[in-house]
Amino acid sequence: MPTSPVAVVTGAYRGLGLETCKQLAEQGYRVVLTARREAEGKAAAARLSGAGLDVRFHPLDVGDETSVQALVDLLKTELGGLDVLVNNAGIFPDPGPGAPESSVFEADLDSIRRAFEINTLAALRLCQRLIPLMDGSGRVVNVSSGMGQLGDMNGCCPAYRLSKTALNAVTRIFADELQGTGIKVNSVCPGWVRTDMGGANATLSIEDGAKGIVWAATLPENGPSGGFFRHGEPIPW
């Protein structure tokens, strides 16, 4: 009897990550909800599981190799591999737009390094470690941002902007090297969403923001790879 596909979502104890877990589980995926904050992650997974969804929590610090290895071991020994990876975990270390300190002239290099470690290099490592578990067929979604688009690049917030631009490059490189396989790798901008990061004035609900992520995570065999999308539509790099 075939088993349900397995999805891993990082940074998923709240916001877009949590909603992505919910929507994937509603489509029949066995979802591993991961988060660095163990208490909050367990509580979030318990709420979804209590609603009848196949969601389990696993602690994951995306910046820690030992933590990543523990996730690899879980997928190998208990779940039989992986079908979907959603690299959602991320930080916004810059001062808010409008603050003098948000200028690139005032940029703190330690903040930029931290943004690269979490927003870019952690996703790169997870791709390196988890894509081989897909056995030639799967979907990778790198949750990016319009703030990383070179074609629409503005000032301010250099740590976040640079790290998301680099994440888009990660998407392109993996997608190219995976040509000829059944694995698709795409970047998704969810839009301006009412999360803790997006703020209360954002135009989209969390439910609507997650739909574009889930769309990319569940692409059919003839779906695209190596693209940048918002709400299921391609956008410029």
Image (cartoon, helix red, strand yellow):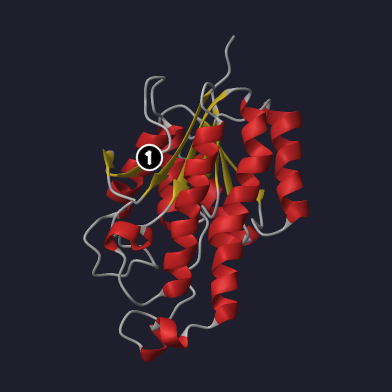
Let me know if residue 28 appears in the view. yes
Residue 28 x, y percent position in the rendering:
46, 27
Residue in the foreground of this view, choosing between 226 and 76: 226
Can you give x and y, in whole percent of width and height, for residue 200 in the image?
Answer: 28, 69
216 relative to 39 in the view: left or right: left
**Residue in view at x 39 percent, y 84 percent:** 103
Residue 36 image point, x, y percent = 63, 59
Q: Residues within 10 Å of mark 1 (few under 14, many from 20)?
A: many
- Image quadrant where residue 174 sits: top right
Q: Residue furthest left?
A: 203
Residue positioned 56% across, 33% down in the render: 177
Q: Is residue 181 above or below residue 131?
A: above
Mark 1 secondary-structure assignment: loop
The one nearer the camera, 60 or 109, is: 109
Q: Is residue 60 above or below residue 95?
A: above
- Rendered position, 118 above or below 214: below
Query: Callout 1, which amino acid?
Result: Gly
Quadrant of the rendered image containing residue 158: bottom left
Q: Is residue 146 visible?
A: no
Q: Where residue 154 sits in the image (x, y, percent)? A: 30, 71
> Mark 1 = which residue?
227
